[in-house]
Image: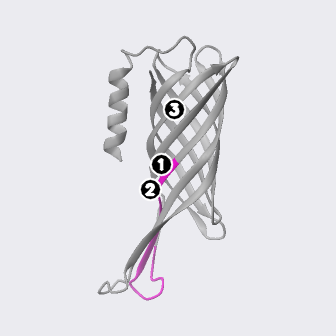
Amino acid sequence: MRKYIFAALLAGTMAAPALAQGEAPFTGPRVEGIVGWDRAQVEDAGRKDGVTYGVGVGYDVQMGGMIAGIEAEATDSSADTCRNDVTVPGDRLCVGAKRDLYVGGRIGSVVGSNTLLYAKAGYTNARFGYDYDDGGDGSTDFGNGRNLDGVRLGAGLEHAIGPNSYVKAEYRYSNYQDDVEKHQAVAGFGFRF
């Protein structure tokens, strides 16, 4: 995943000077890298904090005094937990959040000349995996994963730091099947073309 993030940021860096931003601020195609805090929790079963990281792409247009856009994102997470001695002494069960795919839209308003305040909503699909080690000969070891569909809501602030680059801060809440949810606070750096 890290090599894809690096490649996307490198491509954006090389293309940004050649492709100038359109006539309106915060419009046109964009690519960004994100990193931040990730809390995965299951109702009545606890929660675990970790780091989320990934890449996003989007396209924004000006509609009167508003900015509207579509976006997609692929992230991964380090939020996982392990327990020892689950069924027999020496065994180990690990459960963790894995990749998360998101597609949705956002709408916002430019404040001043270089800051965008926005709200977002969309569909998200996250993978949660588990691995069991019997602590012995491995005859009962197993692992599996499950994809869960959900809805994401969020709000953020994007600040232009140059004609084609920006930084952003965003909070988002995702609610998945099976009483699973995520809270995330992320920061990002991106380029517009």
Residue type at mark 3: give it: Gly
Q: Is residue 87 magenta?
A: yes
Q: Position of residue 167 (x, y in %)?
A: 50, 28
Residue type at mark 2: give it: Ser
52 lies above or below 42: above
Q: Residues within 10 Å of mark 2 (few under 14, many from 20)?
A: some
149 or 166, which lies in front?
Answer: 149
The residue that disc 1 covers is: 52
Tell me where the magenta segment starts and ends, as one range: 83-101
Quarter of the rendering containing residue 15:
top left
189 or 63, which lies in front?
Answer: 63
> Please, what secondary structure does the residue beneath circle 1 have?
strand
Q: Position of residue 132 (x, y in %)?
A: 41, 77
Q: Give the mark, 1 or 3, whose residue is nearer the N terminus.
A: 1
Q: Are marks 1 and 3 in contact (CB under 8 Å)?
A: no
27 or 170, which lies in front?
Answer: 27
The residue that disc 2 covers is: 78
In this rendering, the label closer to the viewer, 1 or 3 = 3
Quarter of the rendering containing residue 112:
top right
Q: Position of residue 14 (x, y in %)?
A: 32, 22
At x 49%, y 25%, the residue is 29
The residue that disc 3 covers is: 58
Tell me the distance, in whole angstroms, between the alpha carbons under discs 1 and 3: 19 Å
Residue 28 shows up from this direction = yes
Q: Are marks 2 and 1 in contact (CB under 8 Å)?
A: yes
Residue 132 shows up from this direction = no
74 or 91, which lies in front?
Answer: 74
Q: Residues within 10 Å of mark 3 (few under 14, many from 20)?
A: many
> Please, what secondary structure does the residue beneath circle 3 have?
strand
At x 62%, y 44%, the residue is 122
